[in-house]
């Protein structure tokens, strides 16, 4: 089972105690996944299509609780391999559901004003008036058109709808909970999405998917820990490689100085560090400094070694050394 399916199955086990929350969740689900049709025989009807059996049962039971009616359920099984069955819930215009149908008829408007949404919080008849209803609405929207990526791979949560008005409503509701949701147009549909791990965690908490939230957080903590460990290891490896390369270069340069001009022509301070570097090839700058008389800090040791490098470079640039190399 995918992580997205596990989240939806958990949400389908949540009981809505208030009737207003039932209506808010059903309204969101129908607006996101419902298809409105007008037939000559029976007037307007709504088809709600889903591949999630738990969600189909939840919508069926919620509408029955609200309106005490039986919906027509059609199950379509695909002949293709690895294809899930589709559940089609069909219900016609009846008292109470007319309110949802009216919203379906007006949702084709291009945009919805934010002022209108803000005013809906103050309207006692609005489904956005109560905090519990706003949470139920987001839960219904996610159940109907949402998905969440496996947190082991990436952090991404989205809700897809066919109408911009619905996308604006969802984005606005998310913004009320300080969630930084974005909207994009993808193949004629509008996608409201969250990319940040913290926002996704907060959203799961808002809609009531607490078990999924804990699993998501555990995975996120482990990923962050692995990333931190990898960064530390990579940093230490790079530093070690840099130290080894510097040590090899220093030893080669000191050997060149000893072979060409000899240590006797070096100042006392440079001769001491050159001899110590040849004797203790694996010692760090700090260890070399502690062996000197008097002891010297890392910066002092590094300065003297750079002086030796400069002398070696001058030897390499001299005509005598070049002629010697040519003869070899």
Image: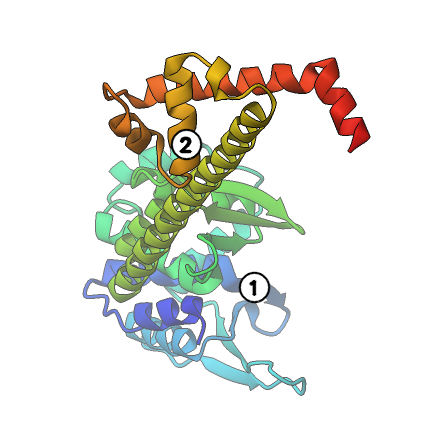
Q: Tell me the distance, in whole angstroms, between the alpha carbons under discs 1 and 2.
A: 80 Å
Is 115 rendered above or below residue 67?
above
Q: Which quadrant holds the N terminus?
A: bottom left
- Which residue: 32% across, 23% down? 298
Residue placed under numbered mark 1 in the picture: 35
Instruction: Answer left or right for 237 relative to 121.
Output: right
Label 2 crowd (10 A; few <14 / some 14-19 / many >=20): many
State which quadrant residue 24 falls in. bottom left
- Residue 306: x %, y % from top left: 48, 19
Percent position (x, y) of residue 51? Answer: 51, 75
Against 232, residue 319 (above or below) is above
Is any part of residue 230 visible from this angle? Answer: yes
The disc label shown at residue 277, or none: 2
Farthest residue to the left: give it: 17
Quadrant of the rendered image containing residue 86: bottom right
Q: Is residue 105 above or below residue 275?
A: below
Horizontal placement of 318 versus 204: left or right?
right
Secondary structure under the numbered disc 2 in the rendered image = helix
Q: Residue at x 25, y 21 (%)?
A: 293
Q: Residue furthest right?
A: 327
Q: Is residue 256 left or right of residue 172?
A: right
Q: Position of residue 194 (x, y in %)?
A: 44, 46
Mark 1 is surrounded, within 10 Å at the Cα level, by few (under 14), some (14 to 19) or many (20 or more) other residues, namely some
Image colouring: rainbow
Residue farthest to the front, as pictured: 264
Q: How many marks?
A: 2
Q: Nearer the viewer, mark 1 or mark 2?
A: 2
Mark carried by residue 85: none
At a point 32% along the width and 57% down the height, the residue shown is: 222
Residue 127 visible in the picture: no
Using the image as rendered, state which of residue 301 and residue 53 is in the foreground. Answer: 301
């Amino acid at each position: 089972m995918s992580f997205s399916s596990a989240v939806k199955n958990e949400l389908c086990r949540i009981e809505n105690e208030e009737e207003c929350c039932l209506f808010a969740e059903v309204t969101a689900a129908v607006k996101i996944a419902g298809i409105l049709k007008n037939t000559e025989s029976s007037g307007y009807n709504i088809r709600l299509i889903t591949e999630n059996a738990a969600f189909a049962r939840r919508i069926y039971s919620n509408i029955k609780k609200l309106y005490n009616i039986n919906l027509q359920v059609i199950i379509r099984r695909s002949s293709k391999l690895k294809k899930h069955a589709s559940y089609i819930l069909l219900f016609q215009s009846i008292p109470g559901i007319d309110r949802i149908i009216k919203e379906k008829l007006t949702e084709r408007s291009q945009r919805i004003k934010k002022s209108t949404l803000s005013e809906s919080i103050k309207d006692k008849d609005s489904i956005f008036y109560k905090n519990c209803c706003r949470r139920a609405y987001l839960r219904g929207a996610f159940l109907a058109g949402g998905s969440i990526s496996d947190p082991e791979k990436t952090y991404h949560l989205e809700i897809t709808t066919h109408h911009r008005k619905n996308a604006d409503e969802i984005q606005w509701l998310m913004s009320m909970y300080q969630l930084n949701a974005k909207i994009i147009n993808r193949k004629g549909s509008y996608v409201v999405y969250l990319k940040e791990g913290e926002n996704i965690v907060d959203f799961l908490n808002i809609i009531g998917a607490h078990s999924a939230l804990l699993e998501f957080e555990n995975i996120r903590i482990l990923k962050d820990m692995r990333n931190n460990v990898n960064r530390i290891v990579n940093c230490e490896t790079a530093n070690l490689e840099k130290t080894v390369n510097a040590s090899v270069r220093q030893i080669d340069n000191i050997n060149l100085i000893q072979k060409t001009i000899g240590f006797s022509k070096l100042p006392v301070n440079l001769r001491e560090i050159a001899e110590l570097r040849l004797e203790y090839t694996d010692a760090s700058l700090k260890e070399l400094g502690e062996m000197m008389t008097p002891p010297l800090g890392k910066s002092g040791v590094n300065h003297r070694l750079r002086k030796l490098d400069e002398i070696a470079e001058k030897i390499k640039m001299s005509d005598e050394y070049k002629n010697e190399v040519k003869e070899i």
